[in-house]
Amino acid sequence: MDSMRRTFLFFLLALLSGSWSRAQKVGLVLSGGGASGLAHIGVIKAMEEDSIPIDYITGTSMGALVGAMYAAGYSPAQMEQLATSEQFQNWAYGKIDDKYVYYFKKKEDNASWISFKLSLDSIIETSLPTNLVSPVAIDFALMETMSGAIAAAGYQFDSLFVPFRCLASDIEAKRSVIFREGDLATALRASMAYPFYLRPMLVDGKLLFDGGIYNNFPANVMYDDFFPDIIIGSNVSNNEPPPNEESLLSQMKTMLLTKTNFDVICQNGIIIEPAVNNIGTFDFGNVQVLIDSGYASAKRKIAQMKTCIERRTTPEMLKQKRAAFQKKQPPLVFGNVTVSGVSRNQTKYIGRLLSRKSGQTTVARLKPEYFKLAADDKIKHIYPSARFNPRSGYYDLHLRIKREKDFVTQIGGNFSNRPISVGFLAVQYNYLGAVSGDISGNAYFGKLYASGQIRARLNIPYKIPFYIEGNYTNSRWDFFKSSAEFVTDVKPSFLVQYEQYLYGDIGFPVGNKGKLVTGTGLAWLTDEYYQTDQFTQQDTADLTDFNLYTAYAYYEKNSLNRKQYASQGSYFNVRLRYVQGEEDFTPGTTSLDSIGFRKIHEWLVLKLVYEKYFKSRKFYKAGIYFEGVYSAQTLFNNFTSSILSAPAFQPLPESKTLFQEKFRAHKYLAIGIKQVFSIRSFLDLRLEGFAYEPYQRIIRGPGLTADYTTPFLETFFIGTAALVVHTPLGPASVGANYYYGEDEPFTFLFHFGYIIFNKKALD
């Protein structure tokens, strides 16, 4: 009897043991760690390949994003494809996909480095940026990719494809916040709000930052909320070393971050540590390497996992479960749209910009309009959240909007080894109501170039939006070879150009990347020059005044990634201008003429510029450049005035600061090849070459008059080799340039900042 009882108990224990092993629950904990956290995708990929079950997931920061994708029903293959895409790179670096960039709202480029923003009600306080990258792209992407899954789960994280938790940090209460329900996209965005990189999130009145500040490895949350039988941890992070007295960054990290316990806090635990030590926090340039590292590290632990975990999930089981969960997800179609954070009139303006009619809107139709709204410089921030409404069968979209500050101040300029250094200052006042507008002014100050501009713009949000703009600009160009100091006394100059103009424009969008602008205006141009090298301080220069009326129209399309030293995108501009004006020549003391001269000039000029960079290889970009000008302009009274008023070919930043007779003509064609080698994400080597062919060069005739050469007499060349460092403030470049046919063909240029100026009157 005892023997039978022992046998029965043995079989009962064996049966219970087998049932327990089959019912084992496995929790996966994913650490934060910035870009290195993408290694978690490889870990999940390896676990699925070997049928290791994943029953719960907790994650922080990048671990939260990877975990949420899996919990939302993404397969490891889908996660890998997304993480290695250009789209994901755009999210990580705050870039908007080229096809959604709204160029119509972009203002003219200037030499600014940094902006300071102020409000009328807090004029003393400046508003420094709280984030380095724009969250616009990732905010919309999270809403787009996570809304269906969380709607299918009834906004309960336990009901996702895999039950899920993520953490953010409440810096006021100095504690972690655990998300168990609500909007999944908002929870993720809060968990990833790395200080100074991504904008923090306001959730239920709390300002939340990256979850890694207080808990970068939420094994305790896994244990407390799910109590699994086995905990597997994937860790790509570690605690910061003690602060260094010479390193401000290490001191700030020590003040911000709380030490994290990277243990799995249970006996049945396995830690996977992918080899990602040499990857920077925001280095998303080697995603495939990170995923492969996670995969390889997990594979080395598979045998241990299989020893501890007897239960298996087959690919067919997962496929069926995913399909069932995805089938529950309502398609992302919006019904009601609400706006908060702005006034009633501002809400009307926003509604017009969205171009939304009554009825339903698909995400594909909303997306371009949303990014148009985000591109408006009167709007500082926009955050979208979508919640499924079971009554209507559609999603309610809510846009939380924060308007831009009333005043924006910009500072910048260019500092160089050559005497072309220029300082820059600008101020803009913003208005946002039923329409939007701004009044701005800028000033450039330096020896080569000085300019002031006042500009006013009104944006009308009709069905076809347009803007009306007026500007007054007063500039001086002083071409000289003198002191290299930033500020010196002005001496008699060989060539000085003064110009004033008053223009009015009307602009219309053409697609997302283009605009059509038409305008008219008046300009007053004065050239002061000597037609000989033999002059003294007692001499007076020759003067040519040209007072003109102009009307113009141009089409412009721009997707270049930088305002100077671009390496991606394209630029196209075709411009037609009519000019009518009176030339008035006043001879100076060194002139061969003793009496003045007046003449009416009238002409049309057509100019086309095209620049494009091709996607060649990751570390190499090839580009082409084309420029053509056809002007019916006639010669002025003398050679110098004729050459000063002629269109100039200036393809390099330095060439915009030089007066080069051989590269000015009324009609010309030019082509160029650009090669950009990206040594690092912030460091480029640029090699560029251009061929310039004037139809007829302007040359000196008898008695200092101007004349034309025979057509296509000579081709001229420009070349450059430069290293460019792209800093947060602006580019720093050092390089050598070559100008064929010049008396001194080789030049050396170092500069920091932007060699950008206000437009000339006849550009």
Image (cartoon, grey):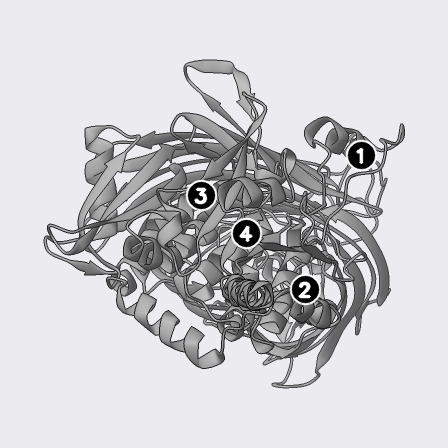
- Of labels 1 and 4, earlier in sequence is 4
**Mark 1 to mark 3: distance in Å?**
28 Å
Indicate which label's residue lies in the foreground, 4 or 2.
Answer: 4
- The quadrant where residue 195 appears: top right
- Of labels 1 and 3, earlier in sequence is 3
- Label 2 is placed on what type of residue? Gly
**Where residue 543 sits: x, y (%)?**
61, 45
**Where residue 632 sits: x, y (%)?**
45, 71
- The structure residue drawn at horizontal position 59% and vertical position 57%, both measured from the top left corner, is 562
- The structure residue drawn at horizontal position 85% and vertical position 61%, both measured from the top left corner, is 747
Residue labelled with disc 2? 285
- Residue 500, visible in the rendered structure: no
- Label 4 is placed on what type of residue? Pro
- Of labels 3 and 4, earlier in sequence is 3
- Label 3 is placed on what type of residue? Ala
Residue labelled with disc 1? 250
Q: Is residue 489 left or right of residue 201?
A: right
- The structure residue drawn at horizontal position 59% and vertical position 70%, both measured from the top left corner, is 310
Residue labelled with disc 4? 228
**Mark 2 to mark 3: distance in Å?**
26 Å
- Of labels 2 and 3, earlier in sequence is 3
